Image (spheres, helix red, strand yellow):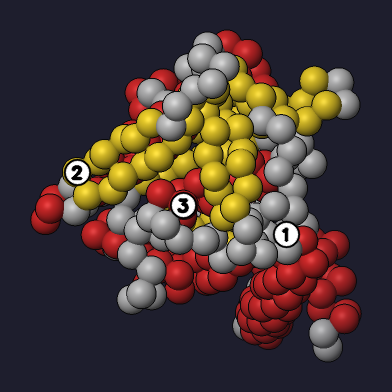
């Protein structure tokens, strides 16, 4: 029977953390994590994943932050893996993960970064395309997100960013990444993952996808991971599933309503501009060239908005 072992990490300002774990089957560790209903649950985790998180933790104690990317197809288990990682992270600090630290929109992500009472917390941004993209950095919210993400490093957060398409990310976010976990299935079995923890390799993989327009899976096949892993299903251990689904539904509905309002406002401004150009004597084809639409589309807009 393996004996419990300790890792003692020292940071600046005499900050010290003691991590207790039990080695298991040479390549794994046993951790007594906190469940959402205040129980302790022994969970077996690959040693490579545990070591990668310890490495990020050491950086955080030395006044940096940590960024983890989690990719994979819809339904393959990204959220389940992220919830496990965030629970391990909070357990490092003798805290229980709470659902308040999971967000689905850039606005809520930025708000959590800005809070005063959550230093070193793990912030999980589920399906983090909106706001983290290169396209969105042109928007007011995208700029606010970028500023908060870069300037709040002293908060020493762990950011977990989940996304289906990594090419949608902004380059500056990728450059901050210290760990990339790609989730995949074998047949109908979930729980398999590939772990990449070399910063240079992560940036190279991103460039291949972004510059050469390659699919994520193509690049994953070309690049050898640091570790091939398998994690047993921990769904429902760290978050109440009903509360999780309710919070996700509320946030995404609010975001959709806000987006629709903005889209409607932009459409009205565009249509008003088209009408003004026509009043000034421009032909429909000229207006189409200016706006970037076809002449029949301009004609339809004029009919519907007269």
Q: Is residue 276 visible?
A: yes
Compared to residue 298, the image places residue 218 above or below, namely: above
> Judging from the image, what secondary structure is the residue with disc 2 in?
strand
Distance of mark 3 from mark 2, alpha carbons?
Answer: 17 Å
Compared to residue 235, the image places residue 286 above or below, namely: below
Distance of mark 2 from mark 1, alpha carbons?
Answer: 61 Å
- Residue 21 in percent (x, y) is at 45, 35
Query: Is residue 299 shown left or right of residue 271?
Result: right
Task: Say whether disc 2 or disc 1 marks the residue closer to the N-terminus.
Answer: 2
Q: Residue at x 46, y 55 (%)?
A: 90
How many other residues sit within 10 Å of disc 3, few (<14), some (14-19) or many (≥20)? some
> What residue is disc 1 on?
293
> What residue is disc 2 on?
10
Q: Is residue 225 visible?
A: no
Q: Residue at x 45, y 61 (%)?
A: 95
Task: Single out the residue that lies furthest toward the bottom.
Answer: 306
> Judging from the image, what secondary structure is the residue with disc 3 in?
helix
Compared to residue 123, the image places residue 188 above or below, namely: above
Q: Residue at x 40, y 40 (%)?
A: 20
Task: Say whether disc 1 or disc 3 marks the residue closer to the N-terminus.
Answer: 3
- Residue 3 in percent (x, y) is at 45, 27
Viewer-side residue, 238 vs 24:
24
> Judging from the image, what secondary structure is the residue with disc 1 in?
loop
Distance of mark 1 from mark 3, alpha carbons?
Answer: 55 Å
- Residue 146 in percent (x, y) is at 38, 59
Q: Residue at x 34, y 35 (%)?
A: 6
Q: How many marks?
A: 3
> What residue is disc 3 on?
91
Instruction: Write down the quadrant of residue 296 in the picture.
Output: bottom right
Classify the position of the C terminus by image quarter.
bottom right
Viewer-side residue, 290 vs 83:
83
């Amino acid at each position: 029977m393996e004996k419990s072992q300790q890792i003692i990490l020292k940071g600046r300002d005499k900050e010290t953390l003691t991590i207790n774990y039990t080695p298991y089957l040479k390549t794994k560790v046993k951790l007594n994590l906190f469940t959402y209903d205040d129980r302790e649950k022994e969970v077996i985790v690959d040693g490579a994943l545990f070591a990668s998180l310890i490495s990020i933790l050491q950086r955080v104690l030395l006044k940096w932050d940590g960024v983890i990317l989690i990719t994979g197809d819809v339904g393959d288990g990204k959220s389940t893996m992220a919830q496990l990682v965030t629970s391990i992270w909070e357990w490092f600090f003798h805290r229980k993960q709470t659902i308040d630290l999971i967000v689905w929109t850039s606005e809520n992500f930025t708000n959590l970064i800005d809070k005063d009472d959550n230093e070193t917390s793990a912030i999980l941004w589920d399906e983090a395309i909106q706001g983290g993209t290169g396209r969105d950095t042109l928007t007011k919210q995208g700029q606010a997100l970028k500023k908060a993400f870069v300037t709040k490093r002293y908060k020493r957060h762990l950011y977990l960013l989940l996304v289906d398409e990594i090419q949608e990310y902004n380059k500056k976010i990728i450059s901050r990444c210290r760990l990339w976990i790609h989730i995949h299935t074998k047949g109908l079995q979930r729980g398999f993952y590939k772990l990449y923890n070399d910063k240079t390799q992560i940036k190279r993989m991103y460039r291949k996808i972004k510059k050469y327009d390659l699919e994520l899976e193509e690049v994953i096949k070309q690049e050898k991971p640091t570790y091939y892993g398998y994690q047993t299903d921990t769904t429902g251990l760290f978050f109440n599933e009903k509360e999780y689904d309710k919070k996700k539904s509320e946030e995404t509905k609010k975001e959709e309503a806000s987006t629709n309002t903005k889209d409607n406002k932009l459409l009205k401004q565009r249509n008003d501009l088209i009408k003004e150009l026509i009043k000034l004597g421009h032909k429909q084809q000229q207006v189409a060239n200016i706006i970037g639409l076809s002449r029949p589309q301009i004609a339809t807009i004029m009919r519907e908005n007269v």
